[in-house]
């Protein structure tokens, strides 16, 4: 009876030792990844153009960028900045751009303008502004085009630069 107790005690001691080593190794790995993430985020914050970009580590040496930057130039700059940090082997770019959002808004407004018969009117979105340009016949059509754009994004300011051609006299 004494012998089985010593055998199980030895197995228990070995198992605890293995778990301790594995746990310490994984904690060291997690610390390295957290340190890498912090270095990449510090590098991104050092450039005011990249203040909307953030990073996390997905695997050893792999950094995922997320958040919003102004345009594709800033997106490329964020990726280059992250790649320049020692320890980064790969960068996954999940950044969004403000100009990309504006392009989607423009497309939605332009589709609605076409649906309402405004074939010669275009919208351009820049931040909180919608710029309308093109040609219509009559002031009423110009006002209606602005109403169509405003109905889609009522919180945006309309700058109506549509040229009004006078209607037919006959």
Image (cartoon, rainbow, N blue to C red):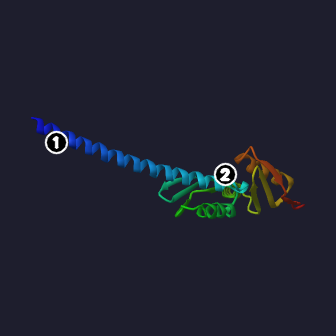
**Residue of label 2:** 52
Q: Which mark is residue 167?
A: none
| CB atoms of marks 2 and 1 within 8 Å | no
Which numbered disc, 2 or 1, marks the residue closer to the eye? 1
Location of residue 40 in the rendering, given as x and y in whole percent from the top left corner: 60, 55
The quarter of the picture where the C terminus appears is bottom right
Q: At 74% from the left edge and 43% from the top edge, which residue is drawn?
A: 155
Location of residue 133 in the rendering, given as x and y in whole percent from the top left corner: 81, 60
Q: Is residue 4 left or right of residue 155?
A: left
**Residue of label 1:** 7
Q: Quadrant of residue 74?
A: bottom right
Q: Secondary structure at mark 1?
A: helix
Location of residue 81 in the rendering, given as x and y in whole percent from the top left corner: 64, 62
Relative depth, front residue between 26 and 56: 26
Q: CA distance from mark 2 to mark 1?
A: 59 Å
Q: At 21% from the left edge and 39% from the top edge, which residue is drawn?
A: 9
Q: Is residue 9 left or right of residue 100?
A: left
Relative depth, front residue between 63 and 168: 63
Q: Is residue 20 left or right of residue 162?
A: left
The quarter of the picture where the N terminus appears is top left
């Amino acid at each position: 009876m004494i012998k089985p107790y010593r055998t199980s005690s030895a197995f228990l001691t070995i198992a605890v030792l293995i778990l301790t080593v594995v746990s310490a190794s994984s904690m060291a790995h997690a610390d390295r990844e957290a340190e890498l993430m912090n270095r990449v985020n510090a590098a991104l914050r050092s450039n005011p153009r990249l203040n909307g970009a953030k990073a996390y580590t997905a695997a050893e040496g792999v950094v995922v960028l997320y958040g919003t930057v102004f345009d594709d130039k800033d997106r490329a700059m964020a990726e280059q900045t992250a790649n320049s940090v020692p320890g980064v082997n790969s960068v996954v770019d999940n950044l969004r751009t403000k100009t990309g959002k504006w392009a989607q808004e423009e497309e939605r407004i332009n589709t609605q303008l076409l649906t309402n018969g405004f074939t010669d009117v275009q919208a351009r979105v820049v931040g909180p502004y919608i710029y309308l340009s093109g040609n219509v016949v009559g002031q009423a059509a110009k006002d209606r085009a602005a109403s169509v754009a405003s109905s889609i994004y009522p919180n945006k300011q309309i700058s109506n630069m549509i040229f009004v051609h006078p209607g037919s006299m006959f």
